[in-house]
Amino acid sequence: MEKTQLYNPDGLQLDNLYRGLPNGGMIEITVDRSLLTQTLNNLEAIGYIAMEIRADLPLRARSVIKAYKGKHGPCFDTGRRATYRGAALAALDDDNHLLIAGKERAVCEKTATIYQLSPFRNLIAVKESSSSRKASLTERPTHFQNDSFENDQETLYQLVSPGADIANRSLLFYPGPFRLLILADGTVVRRGQVSAVPQAEASRLIKMDGLQNATSPAATDPEFFQELYTSQGSKWLVSNFQPVEIDTGAEDPDFSSLRKVHPKLKKRLTEVIEKQKKYFILTGSDPLDTFGCCPSEEVGAANQLVGANVLSACRQDTGPQECPVTIYAFRDEIFASADDLEFKPNVDLRKSVNAILRSGTGSVSKKIIRWILLSFVVVSLLFAYKNFINTEHRQNLDGLFSQISPDQDDQLLVVLFHYEKRCPQCTRMEFLTQSVLQDHFGDAVDRNMIKFDMINMDQIDYRDLTRESGLFAATMFLLSYQQGELKQTKILEEAWNLYLDDEAFKRMLTREVNTLLVL
Amino acid sequence: MSYPDPLYFDYSASTPPFPEALEKFRDISMRFFANPSSRHQAGKEARKRFLEAKKSFCDLLHFSDGRVLLCSSGTEANNTIIEGHRLRFPEGRLLIAEDAHDCIWYAREKYPDHTDVLDIDRSGQIDPNQFIETIRPTTTLVCINHVCNELGTIHPVADFADICAARGIRLLVDGAQAMGHIPVDLGQIAATYYSFSAHKFGGPRSVGGIFLRDSDFEPLLHGGRQEWELRASTENLAGFVATITAFEHCLTSIETERDRLDELMDHFLKEVKSEVPRVLINSPDERLPGFVSLSMPGFLGTEIVAALSLSGHALSTGSACHENQITPSRVIMAMGRSGEEAQGTIRISMGRGTTSLSVQRLTRALIEFLL
């Protein structure tokens, strides 16, 4: 690890130092007390993470700050998981990850590496990935996908116990490394500042998170998460939000784009309308951006709606190779001002979108014709498919399954094998599966006990194995892992029979998933 | 001779500097002549100007997670990485693209036991799947062009960078022919090292550099603590600021120049192909604007260059760095051309001084010579 020391550096010097640091590298700087806040702001803006203000010097004339580099670079999924073990209810790091105490969350390999740096070592438990997942990094790297930014805040909102006792408070200084902590009553504790925290929690915060007693300077009035969240929405947690407006066209909204909207996005749009939210936030990049950090299908779907002039968007002016944060609102509802966002409701558009989302689309006659044509294809494929199910090819599936590994020891993988060129049946099965998992197994999915995986059979790693296994069409499997071992497999033979009947498909999948979950 | 010379068709070898860049060179040389390493006020001011320049250059390329190391040329930049890497990781293997410039390709002859070659296909491209298959467990450094200096091929280096990043392999991208000519966004190209040369885009001579995302290599030059001790030598502040000025000029017209040069090149190729059907176009369709490599079976490239030079036209047979060699180009041969075809290769690269009139003159002169 590299370490550099400096006294009262300005932004240019800090930028220069940052550029020279390797990932995981650290600088140690000494700053006059009067420059502490400004320097912390500079460090955050440049991209430093895990800033720690030396414990024994917070309120003296000078402070020593340690800061690290590490959030740049692509995010790969190796099945790593992290749990915050401090005394606060939640902690927010410098890369917009909200960690709720005691709740394990999936993190990318890069973030897991950051959490193993010394400032986090006693605060975050990081689960190692299995050797096969580690090997996947060099053999078959997969981008990390886990956009939980808004959900995490919603969860936190449910967990906070308001009714704070403003009178009985202790003044504590928070030296980091998190950007901020949120306490059980919602009190927000910011790094580098003195906060008034409930007396009952003070000793645990001192012991577990390294906060220090302080008498001066006086703390400002306490801030509460629930107030900030309800008044500003989830964007208040995004650090240094410098919005960049994404251009939309001058044409009228193309409402047909809502017909095949991603189920998660559909749910989100409905929620925005029904709860009269101003916007929603997605993290991650558009999958069309091959090299974007944390590709997210939902971001891709939302961007399509921006292209169709249904939504407007502002993205955070993040550095390259940082996970992008984008704020979406309905068209013409969001405006980037100098350093913040303004919102103006577009009531008519919301009404139109709501009507379309609720009604479903497509004329009956078109649907009937499509169904007849599709049925013909399906019958042909079913015939071939049944042959496959009953042949020796099935024995070769072991080789195919050996290429797949779970994120965690106990997990049920719902896997859809597909070709590069997707057929409507395959995309329908994907859509229905996403809906089932979200509607019926949301909690298990959040806890990563169930994971939906899509595997492209045209990918070089799978091409030969799928050929050997005899797979010739989009096929769904359930793979049940216990203690890292593959214990049960199930080919969802009925998927092809039922994909035209939403309810039957959902019932079938729910039943099969439940069966393997119980096992 | 007017400036820039309209009959100059060798912009890939070197470009005329922007007058504004030379003016900036003069201005900075006079005002910030002090050594940026000196402790006195003048030295500190030079140092501050130097850091500001570095930050602004990095910002222009959206490069926020690494630093730029200045050196004296693109060749020095590439040599610094290869030699420095070899010293630091003597057991590691180098993987070098077949169409790399000689300042990278030399490593194949110097370190034959530690070098593998990444083939180009018959269209001059590198297949990403083949790239993955060529990587060995012991590969530690991959070296590729962003734009091939002989064919003008634009490689998908962001793809390759992603492949390397996932596998923890360092990637050196030679951007000498790309910077200033096509959009380069280093935020999207996760290369470990990206090198450039200022005189290829209207900057002054003897300024090159490398955008670094790590510094795991031994320095070539010793005897000073400049550039984080990665390259000893007093920093060329004036040259660097002039380089940035030139680069900014390129950025302001990069799209209009692309369209203009594409149009001129299309016109040129259409005329030549209609009059001399046997001419072979080596460059792929997707290539550097205003650039083409042609082969004329039955002719020597050197012969064509010399003949057209008599009428004032300046073009080359391929890489300017082996202009005097008589062996056929390895890059053209790698595309499956015969020795005779490779020998008859010329490279035409247009730039800011190229006009439709000058292209017409070149077209006539070339056709007359070949018929």
Image (tube, coloured by chain):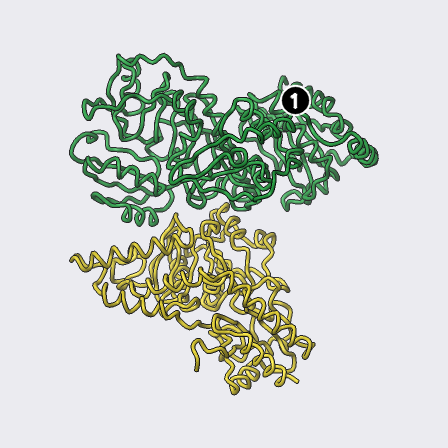
| Shade of chain A as shown in the rendered figure | green
Please tell me in which quadrant of the rendered image residue B150 appears.
bottom right
- Which residue reaches farthest front? A348
Give the residue pinned by disc 1: A513
Q: Position of residue B232 (x, y in %)?
A: 28, 62
Q: Note the chain letter of the yellow one.
A: B
The vertical placement of B73 against A199, above or below, is below
The vertical placement of B315 against A218, above or below, is below
Amino acid, disc 1: Val
Query: Which image quarter is the N terminus of chain A in?
Result: top left
Q: Position of residue A381 (x, y in %)?
A: 80, 36
In the image, A73 versus A322, the foreground residue is: A322
The vertical placement of B195 against A518, above or below, is below
The secondary structure type at the circle numbered 1 is helix
Q: Is residue A387 left or right of residue B357?
A: right
Q: Position of residue A59 (x, y in %)?
A: 19, 29
In the image, A16 versus A250, the foreground residue is: A250
The vertical placement of A35 against B254, above or below, is above
- Note whether residue A503 is visible: yes
Please tell me in which quadrant of the rendered image residue B281 appears.
bottom right
